């Protein structure tokens, strides 16, 4: 799966690429983040999660998996 998916289907067990479709690309409409919490009480966090990341206060609409790293890493 490498196409944008609705945010309602996003996994909560790994970092993914997130898109806020309401923001223009020049305003930073994509972030790498992971969901921390449960369905009723949680939020998206940047790399590092609550112990070192930033809470992402966006209205994400879509997600896609991160690509694999380049060979040799």
Image (cartoon, helix red, strand yellow):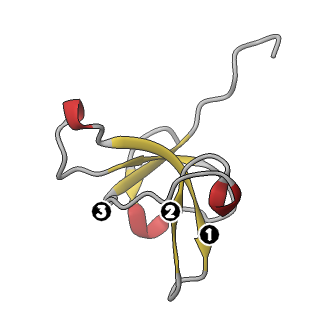
Disc number placed over residue 44 in the picture, else none = 2
User: How many dots with numbers?
Assistant: 3
Give left or right: position of 28 versus 54. Answer: left
**Alpha carbon separation for disc pair 2 and 1:** 6 Å
Q: State which tag comes first along the sequence, 1 or 3.
A: 1
Image x and y of residue 73, in percent:
81, 16
For numbered disc 2, what is the local secondary structure?
A: strand
Q: State which tag comes first along the sequence, 2 or 1.
A: 1
Instruction: In the rendered view, tell whether residue 13 sits above or below residue 41.
Output: above
**Alpha carbon separation for disc pair 3 and 2:** 10 Å
Image x and y of residue 11, in percent:
59, 62
Instruction: In the rendered view, tell whether residue 33 sits above or below residue 37.
Output: above
Q: State which tag comes first along the sequence, 3 or 2.
A: 2
Image x and y of residue 46, in percent:
55, 50
Give left or right: position of 59 versus 3. Answer: left
Number of other residues with Cα within 10 Å of mark 1, as a class: few under 14, some 14 to 19, many 20 or more = some
The foreground one among 60 and 1 is 60
- The residue shown at (64%, 57%) is 49
- The residue shown at (19%, 46%) is 23
Q: Are marks 2 and 1 in contact (CB under 8 Å)?
A: yes
For numbered disc 3, what is the local secondary structure?
A: loop
For numbered disc 1, what is the local secondary structure?
A: strand
Which residue is situated farthest in the right direction here?
72
Image x and y of residue 28, in percent:
30, 37
The residue tagged 1 is 36
Q: Are marks 1 and 3 in contact (CB under 8 Å)?
A: no
- The residue shown at (62%, 69%) is 36
Give left or right: position of 1 versus 4. Answer: right
The residue tagged 3 is 59
């Amino acid at each position: 799966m490498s196409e944008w998916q609705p945010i309602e289907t996003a996994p909560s067990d790994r970092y993914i690429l997130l898109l806020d479709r309401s923001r223009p690309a020049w305003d930073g409409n994509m972030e790498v983040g992971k969901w921390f919490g449960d369905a009723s009480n949680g939020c998206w966090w940047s790399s590092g999660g609550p112990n070192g990341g930033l809470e992402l206060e966006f209205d994400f609409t879509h997600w896609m998996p991160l690509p694999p790293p380049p060979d040799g890493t």
